[in-house]
């Protein structure tokens, strides 16, 4: 999910950021300042055609049908997970100094596109075109940044409001060979069929208890992302641009999700869950193979977020079936039973493709809900 941050929060001091205390470097091309003199007004908001393909999480916090243009200098760059932030010193229409904070992708997603902490230089002039926050007058979702040397960097296209991700390096399947579930996998894309995500069924069977939980759910304060929590196994199969590694170890199957550095141990030598499971987001998993399909049964969940805004109670049980498609891609088909919140099973699926991308530790930096209001 995309989250807001208000400018000037004291909590920034605790983050691993490229900020005011970092020595600034020479701008990329000081002689290019005439491009900024010719820019539009210091700050202007203007309307664009509706972005039909805007991601739902993004659109709930930012307006995909309007754009904001900010001209100023880089004050601070937070190159962190789960989201990066660019702080910009600017001047408002009344001539008063203000600080805008623009939301960026996760550090891992930016790194996969070749970016690092030097993407923005403190003190460097910049023009940012992005999408205004719905509630924070000084918040935005970063679209394209224009640097003084004439170069630019796009995170979300300003035409269709589509986030840009690194192209995957899929490992080809040699003719006559087979692939197992073991290896490193990543979501094929972000949008439509390219996302690899199948439809979810059963959500319309929500019970009165489920409706009550949904009504009490705060999409900001209760979002597991800002708390650096995984949410559930279902959620961790699907984050775009983040990889999952599956391996065998000590007779068990170990699944590592880059998202939140989640490690799941699938106990292959157990047929029943222990009676004294400590409830958790990931629960307790036991597994077995049926031919080449790994079947994972998980119980012992804490009440929380199954995926998106779909909640689960502590009565949740989950079965995942991992198999290889003829194309060589990994299919995860899941069925969730939660009789307290849903009268019917919830089902869904996610397809991942093999990748040669190296695993990158996530090292998430927890946030306070107040930072995103």
Image (cartoon, helix red, strand yellow):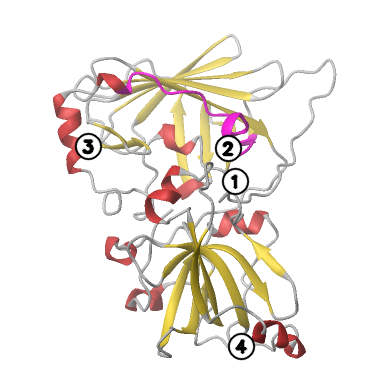
Q: Is residue 134 above or below residue 1?
A: below
Whether residue 1 is visible, yes or no, is: no
The span from disc 2 to disc 1 (Cα, nearest Å) is 12 Å
| Residue 193: in magenta span | yes
Can you identify the residue that label 4 sits on? 24
Task: Work out whether mark 1 precedes mark 3 in sequence or the reverse, and give the earlier one.
Answer: 3
Q: Residue at x 50, y 65 (%)?
A: 46
| Relative to 85, 13 lies left or right | left
Q: Nearer the viewer, residue 194 or 14?
A: 194
Identify the mark at residue 204; answer none if there is no mark: none
Can you identify the residue that label 2 sits on? 191
Q: Residue at x 50, y 48 (%)?
A: 50
Residue range highlighted in magenta:
184-203
Task: Work out whether mark 4 precedes mark 1 in sequence or the reverse, and give the earlier one.
Answer: 4
Identify the mark at residue 214; answer none if there is no mark: 3
Can you identify the residue that label 1 sits on? 241
The span from disc 1 to disc 3 (Cα, nearest Å) is 28 Å
Q: Is residue 95 above or below residue 250?
A: below
């Amino acid at each position: 999910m995309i989250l807001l941050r208000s400018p000037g929060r004291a909590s920034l001091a605790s983050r691993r950021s490229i900020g005011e205390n970092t020595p600034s470097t020479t701008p990329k091309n000081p002689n290019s300042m005439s491009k900024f003199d010719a820019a539009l007004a210091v700050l202007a908001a203007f309307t664009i055609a509706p972005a039909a393909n805007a991601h739902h999480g993004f659109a709930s916090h930012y307006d995909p049908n309007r754009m904001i243009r900010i001209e100023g200098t880089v004050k601070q760059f937070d190159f962190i997970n789960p989201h990066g932030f660019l702080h910009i010193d600017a001047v408002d229409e009344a001539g008063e100094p203000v600080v805008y904070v623009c939301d960026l992708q996760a550090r891992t997603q930016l790194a996969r596109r070749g970016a690092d902490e030097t993407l923005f230089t403190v003190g460097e002039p910049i023009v940012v075109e992005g999408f205004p926050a719905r509630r924070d007058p000084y918040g935005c979702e970063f679209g394209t940044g224009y640097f003084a040397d004439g170069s630019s960097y796009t995170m979300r296209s300003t035409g269709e409001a589509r986030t840009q991700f690194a192209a995957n390096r899929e490992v080809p399947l040699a003719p006559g060979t087979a692939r197992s579930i073991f290896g490193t996998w990543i979501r094929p894309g972000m949008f439509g069929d390219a996302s690899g995500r199948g439809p979810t069924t059963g959500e319309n069977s929500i019970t009165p208890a489920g409706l009550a939980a949904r009504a009490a759910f705060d999409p900001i304060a209760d979002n597991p992302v800002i708390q650096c929590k995984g949410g559930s196994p279902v959620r961790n199969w699907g984050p775009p641009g983040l990889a999952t590694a599956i391996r065998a170890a000590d007779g068990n199957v170990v699944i590592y999700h880059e998202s939140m550095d989640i490690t799941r141990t699938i106990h292959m030598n157990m047929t029943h869950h222990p009676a004294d499971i400590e409830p958790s987001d990931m629960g307790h998993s036991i597994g077995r193979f049926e031919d080449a399909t790994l079947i994972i049964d998980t119980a012992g969940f804490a009440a929380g977020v199954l995926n998106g805004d779909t909640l689960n109670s502590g009565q949740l049980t989950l079965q995942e079936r991992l198999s290889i498609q003829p194309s060589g891609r990994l299919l995860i088909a899941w069925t969730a039973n939660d009789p307290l919140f849903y009268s019917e099973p919830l089902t869904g699926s996610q397809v991942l493709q093999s990748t040669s991308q190296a695993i990158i530790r996530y090292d998430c930096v927890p946030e306070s809900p107040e930072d995103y209001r």
